[in-house]
Image (spheres, helix red, strand yellow):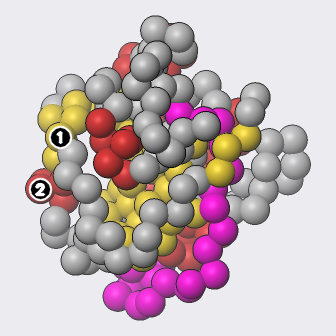
Amino acid sequence: MVATNSEMLELGTQAPEFKLIDTVSGEIVSDADLKDKPLAVLFISAHCPFVVHIQDRLGKISQEFSETVNMIAICSNDIEGYPDDAPDKLAEQAKEFGFAMPYLYDETQEVARAYRAACTPDIFVFNSDHKLVYRGQFDSTRPGGEAANGEDLVAALSAVANAQPVSADQKPSLGCNIKWKPGNEPDYFG
């Protein structure tokens, strides 16, 4: 397990566009469908120990904010090398942990590149204008330590849900690197 930090995309960045298939419903979900509320985009996977550490708490947070923030999860990992991240496995994970959000599969990895996603989890929260106001860690817990509480993500979601500013004290996310398809690694990888 190689721990990788997030890239810390510049605050104020407009949410990149996406149009991906939800692994649970089979429906296509796009950013254009989600303009009515603030948006949280979480790059996660089924196999990464950093995501396994937070997945139970993440499910509860997605339920808690389902009325006030459009949350989506995206897996961009290469499923040839990491079959545990195949769409059917993602759907199982979503159901098991009660994800109240679409769980999308980014087969081409273009969406991960557009967000400069580097690790799982990699978290981006956008205000009601879909301008980036938070990018960083889920919380300060790590696998093998205390239980995940999601305090950093909850603080950001609470702020955008109430049209309040998000704290500028943001720490990079830490997790497994996105598993890029051979030859598809972006310039910021490595």
- Provide the residue span drawn in magenta: 157-178
Q: Amino acid type of disc 2? A: Ala
For the residue labelled by badge 2, is the local secondary structure a helix, a strand or a loop?
helix
Mark sitting on residue 32: 2
| Residue 141, placed above or below residue 26 | below
Residue 186 is inside the magenta segment = no
Name, please, the residue furthest toward the left: 32
Q: In which quarter of the image is residue 138?
A: bottom right
| Residue 82, placed above or below residue 135 | above
Q: Amino acid type of disc 1? A: Lys
Seen from the viewer's position, the closer of residues 68 and 137 is 137
Seen from the viewer's position, the closer of residues 169 and 68 is 169
Report which residue position mark 1 lands on.
19
Mark sitting on residue 149: none
Left or right for 113, reference 178: left
Cα separation between marks 2 and 1: 9 Å
Query: Which quarter of the image is occupied by the N terminus?
Result: top right
Query: Which quarter of the image is occupied by the C terminus?
Result: top right
Name, please, the residue furthest toward the right: 145
Name the residue at 87% across, 41% down.
144
| Residue 69 in the image, given as x and y percentages of width and height | 33, 67
| Residue 107 in the image, given as x and y percentages of width and height | 31, 24
Name the residue at 17% across, 40% down.
19
| Residue 183, placed above or below residue 145 | above
The answer to whether the residue labelled 2 contacts the one labelled 1, judged by CB atoms less than 8 Å apart, is: yes
Name the residue at 16% across, 69% down.
36
Residue 160 is inside the magenta segment = yes
